[in-house]
Amino acid sequence: SVKSQGRNGYSLFDPTMEAKSLERILMENELRKAIEHEQFQVYYQPKMDIGSQILTGMEALVRWVHPELGVISPGKFIPIAEESGMIIELGEWILKEACKQNKKWHDQGHLLKVSVNLSARQIFQKDLVEMITSTLEELELSSEWLELEITESIFVKMEEATVVLQQLRGAGIHISIDDFGTGYSSFSYIKRLPVDTIKIDASFIRDIHHNQESQAIVKAIVTIADSLQMNVIAEGIELDDQVEALQQNGCIHGQGYLFSKPLATEDFEHFLSNQ
Ligand code: C2E
Ligand code: MG
Ligand code: MG
Ligand code: MG
């Protein structure tokens, strides 16, 4: 039996396992309540032309504002939302919220593209394309002002993912590959991906100012993106030296704490008015 497997075997009565699953159950319940009560806030991080420091767009990043625990970062609850399937409902809320907000900014004369992160589960959700296009129609926001950030993880189901991305692009929505260089994608099949923009993962930016390999990788990504008529953006820029190294290797777009942290709506509006 499970119980008799001894020290190294899996035991149903392992107290740490029990504690973990209990914590997980509590967390899932809290998350379910949070979705019901809309305890979330969408923050926006500026995307910049790193040379001129002109704002070119913004990434929507969700935060859970828990009544007792305060602000909880997405790294803590998005994986739970994904595993439990709640990401479908939460993701829809985030997308609608971000598009609604962007429509307001458009009405104020700020014509910017909002980028919304999408989980793999959402990409394979049956009515995703219909949900997004009807949201945009309802808001009277043109699809060119929405970008979806997906990760390479969806390409384990290459054919299914490609079909969905082609439908989205057919509707005029932009697609970007987030965290590029960390996942399944490789240079050999990037040309087949129906995407507009490659986001170079922060791990290549962190040491780019003193690491020749990171410089070479960025340069290679920029070169290939150019030849495929894709855009490139660097994430996680914190230092002027990194900006310089990026520029030397042909990368002209970026985001990171150097320019701004993700901002609550009101703070983003201050950022807008200071532009
Ligand atoms: P991501 O999409 O790759 O977002 C970039 C993360 O890096 C964000 O963390 C952002 O706040 C952080 N960041 C930006 N600039 C810098 C910098 O200069 N230095 C450092 N150290 N960090 C920087 P955040 O907001 O905690 O989000 C983490 C991840 O959670 C995101 O990674 C994304 O995978 C996921 N996520 C966030 N919001 C959503 C969402 O609305 N839907 C889904 N499905 N996932 C989301
Ligand atoms: Mg992202
Ligand atoms: Mg990223
Ligand atoms: Mg990430």
Image: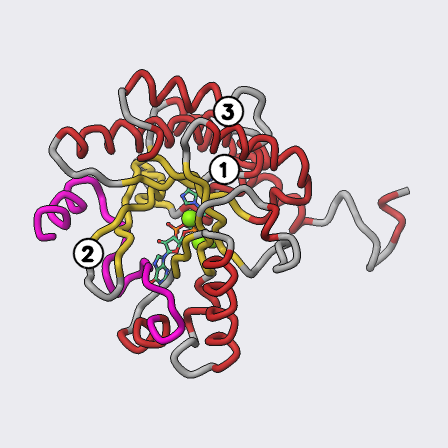
Q: Height in image: 88 above or below 275?
A: above
Quadrant of the rendered structure where residue 103 is? top left
Circle nearer the N terminus (3, 1): 1
Residue picked out by circle 3: 128
Give the camera-side residue of 274 and 16: 274
Residue picked out by circle 1: 27
x, y percentage for residue 163?
A: 61, 31
Where disc 1 sits, the SS reads helix
Q: Quadrant of the N terminus?
A: top right
* Amino acid beneath label 1: Met
Circle nearer the N terminus (1, 2): 1
Q: Note whether residue 69 is visible.
A: no
> How crowded is the residue under tag 3: few (<14 C-alpha within 10 Å), some, or many (20+)?
some
Say if mark 3 contacts mark 1, CB within 8 Å: no
In the image, which is nearer the foreground, mark 3 or mark 1? 3
What's the magenta region?
247-275
Where disc 2 sits, the SS reads strand
